Every structure is written in C-alpha cells, then in structure tokens.
Amino acid sequence: MKSVNLKETRQRKYILEQVRKLSSHPTAEDLYFAINKKFPAVSKATLYRNLDNFCKKGLIKRIEGKYQRFDGNVKPHNHIKCVYCGRVDDIFFDIEINSKKLKKLGYKIEDFAVAINGICPKCAKNKVK
Ligand SMILES: [Zn+2]
Ligand SMILES: [Zn+2]
C-alpha cells in the first residue's frame, strides 16, 4: 500500500510541475499528453481530479471558456484570448476599471479579472493568406 501512495504523490507533484512549467495555459488535454509520456498509468479521471484539487487549494487557476485551461501562475493578472485557436496570453499591464460606476451599484471591489478576446499574431497571419 505504501508504494502506491508514494507513486501517487510523485504523480501529483509531476502534474503540478507541468501546469506551472507550461506557461501556455494548457488545457486538460494538453496536460494529459504531457503527463502520459512520463506516467502512462495516469488516467484522465485521475488527472482531472488532481487539477480540481489544485484549483480548490489555490495552487493553480482555472481559466473559464470554451476550452478549459489551467494557469500555474496564481498571481493576479489578466488574459487575452484568441477567438480562433484558443491561445491565451498573459496581460500584466493595468486595466482601468470605472470605480465610480461600480460604486453606484453599491459594490466594494475585492478583485477583478478581465478577459479580452482577439486574434493572435499567428491566426492573423494565416487569415491574410
Ligand atoms: Zn490564434
Ligand atoms: Zn495567465
């Protein structure tokens, strides 16, 4: 039994490492491919369960959208997403929010996330052809 637990711990550590290493905001599918190379025994169900746990613990973040992606960077930042290929890039510059208008709604702001949609350089280039 002990060896099974040890193996699971190693797998869990590796999954977390992969999410943090892949700055491309990998989908669960991307991660499955990456992890499968090293741990072929890890099923998709196990992977999803682990990703879910990491999110709950705040170790990684889930990016909602058509393709569910994961972010190993939990520091506050925003995202820009390509509407064609689903690629997600980080935005580190400040985005101004209209706090006056929000105050009118009676809210005190805790934090916010902005999702910007666009066309990535690669897709823009392909479209021109
Ligand atoms: Zn694109
Ligand atoms: Zn990000």
Image (cartoon, rainbow, N blue to C red):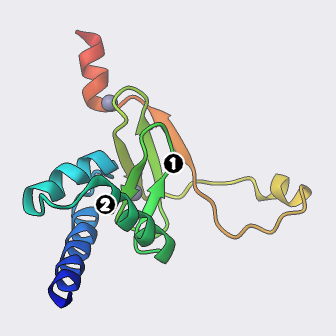
Task: Name the residue beneath numbered marker 2.
Answer: 47
> Which amino acid, by three-letter code, is at mark 1?
Glu
> Which amino acid, by three-letter code, is at mark 2?
Leu
Task: Tell me which residue sits at (14%, 55%) in the image.
Answer: 36
Query: Residue at the bottom extreme?
Result: 2
Q: Which element type, helix, strand or loop, lies under badge 2?
A: helix
Which residue is more in the foreground, 66 or 95?
66
Q: Earlier in the sequence, mark 2 or mark 1?
A: 2
Location of the N terminus by quadrant is: bottom left
Q: Quadrant of residue 46?
A: bottom left
- Which label number is shown at residue 87? none
Instruction: Say left or right for 37 vs 33.
Output: left
Q: Residues within 10 Å of mark 2 (few under 14, many from 20)?
A: many
Task: Tell me which residue sits at (19%, 90%) in the image.
Answer: 2
Q: Position of residue 98 (x, y in %)?
A: 74, 53
Task: Tell me which residue sits at (37%, 58%) in the image.
Answer: 48
Q: CA distance from mark 2 to mark 1?
A: 18 Å
Location of the C terminus by quadrant is: top left
Task: Name the residue beneath numbered marker 1.
Answer: 64
